[in-house]
Amino acid sequence: MTERALQRVLTGITTTGTLHLGNYVGAIRPAIKASREPGVESFLFLADYHALIKCDEPDRIERSRMEIAATWLACGLDTERVTFYRQSDIPETPELTWLLTCVTAKGQMNRAHAYKAAADANTAAGEDLDANITMGLYSYPILMAADILLFNAHRVPVGKDQVQHIEMTRDVAQRFNHLFGRGKDLFVLPQAEIEEHQELLPGLDGRKMSKSYDNAIPLFEGGAKGLKESVARIVTDSRLPGEPKHADNSHLVTIYDAFATPAQRAAFRTALRQGLGWGDAKQQLVDLIEAEIGPMRETYAELMAHPEKVEEALLAGAKKAREIAQPVMHKLRQAVGLRSMSTKANAKPTDGKSNKAKLPVFKQYREGDLFRFKLEDENGELLLASRGFEDPKRAGVHVNLLLEQGLTALQYVLADPNGTVANPSAVEAALKVLAAEKQRKANASGA
Ligand code: TRP
């Protein structure tokens, strides 16, 4: 049997502001590319609860969330492969946030960069240490830890400024495991993945492209015309057409490189050395960017005109995400002692049913055109999700095969990217229980 070692990669995007070309080259394009790698299961979400920490203008919250969702979709995010959702559609996230808040040391939150920077600025200004600081800002890292731990992500691609938050996530996960895991780990400890070789796109003036420097080239805003106007403002030296240019000293060339093939890069440098004028060079740059971005801009406009399509994609993503989050949260509630009173072994049975011992269970469900089944343990925790079957009867056949043959029958059941099994020995144990139960029933009815 092959044990599936799918790596879960998860990242969140705070939905404030609009995106520029630097975000596209540095974050969106590489993330979409990475999500197509085999062997990874990708989760990407709009961190709109985090956005509320930074912004109290409802209309801006709404607009930015819509624009950012439409941008990612327009840039080619494949929602079949990537679980793409809104943080605020997952009620398990704030629920887990509270469980984590209860085991997070306040002193550790005092040291979180974002809070510390704000507190230091207050002190420097002679203000009260905590002037204008909300509990949202203070607890920001705990909400982020919940985002990550809820899905037991292995890898979390983030910028350098977020590494401390991943370290805090590991700390709180470890503490939680220690307090409530009874020797078994409830949470995976995530790794920060810093994009070392991440392409940093220079802005119009050669500094890092950033809205705060006012040197950004917009991604879709302003259309092809806006792109052209923006590129026209790229600062170059004053060499005239016909004069040889130092191609490698020019940030215009760096921007060109981010969209060019190796052959195009070489040809562009040669042309500049041979005296290509900056005006013509800019036109070539516009054409190059437009070839990649133009079609995406059309899709973007289409999505912005039909917000219901975006809504639908996000709700489908939330559904997929919650299929994972709900059983995890259930298990965590059990672990901390928030248990149902009626299912306790010592609870008084009120009717015949509640007296029955709980068993693992197979459940069939439908996803799009396909039929799948899952196996849950006696506490409702997901043990196994099958591949999709076109015919529900085939799914049934495979349930029976699993019961008869155990793990040997597993391989075919998993053979597509949506089939998952976290812990084969737990599956094996549950199958044995079910097979024994089937036998017991057969004996009982035969007698
Ligand atoms: N704090 C992150 C940022 O501002 C966004 C974020 C929220 C995030 N939750 C996350 C990133 C979970 C990775 C994982 O960039």
Image (cartoon, rainbow, N blue to C red):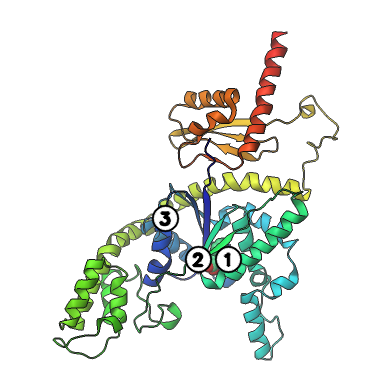
On the question of residue 411 being in view, the answer is yes
The image quadrant of residue 302 is bottom left
- Identify the mark nearer the N-term, 2 or 1: 2
**Residue situated in front as seen by the camera: 63 or 90:** 90
- Identify the mark nearer the N-term, 2 or 3: 2
Q: Nearer the viewer, mark 1 or mark 3?
A: 1
Between the residue at mark 1 and the residue at mark 3, the CA separation in whole angstroms equals 22 Å
| Residue marked by disc 3 | 307
Q: Within the displayed image, which quadrant is ligand 1 positioned in? A: bottom right
The residue shown at (28%, 59%) is: 295
Q: Quadrant of the C terminus?
A: top right
**Residue situated in front as seen by the camera: 367 or 414:** 414
Residue 414 lies, in percent from the top left, at 50, 36
The residue shown at (44%, 63%) is: 68
Q: Amino acid at mark 2?
A: Thr
Mark 2 near mark 1, Cβ–Cβ under 8 Å?
A: yes
| Residue marked by disc 1 | 50
Q: Secondary structure at mark 3?
A: helix
Could you classify mark 2 by the number of other residues whose Cα lies within 10 Å: few (under 14), some (14-19), or many (20 or more)?
A: many
The residue shown at (58%, 66%) is: 50
- Identify the mark nearer the N-term, 1 or 3: 1
Task: Name the disc covering residue 15, or none.
Answer: 2
Residue 41 lies, in percent from the top left, at 49, 50
Between the residue at mark 2 and the residue at mark 1, the CA separation in whole angstroms equals 8 Å
Q: Residue furthest top?
A: 447
Looking at the picture, does residue 245 appear above or below residue 389?
Answer: below
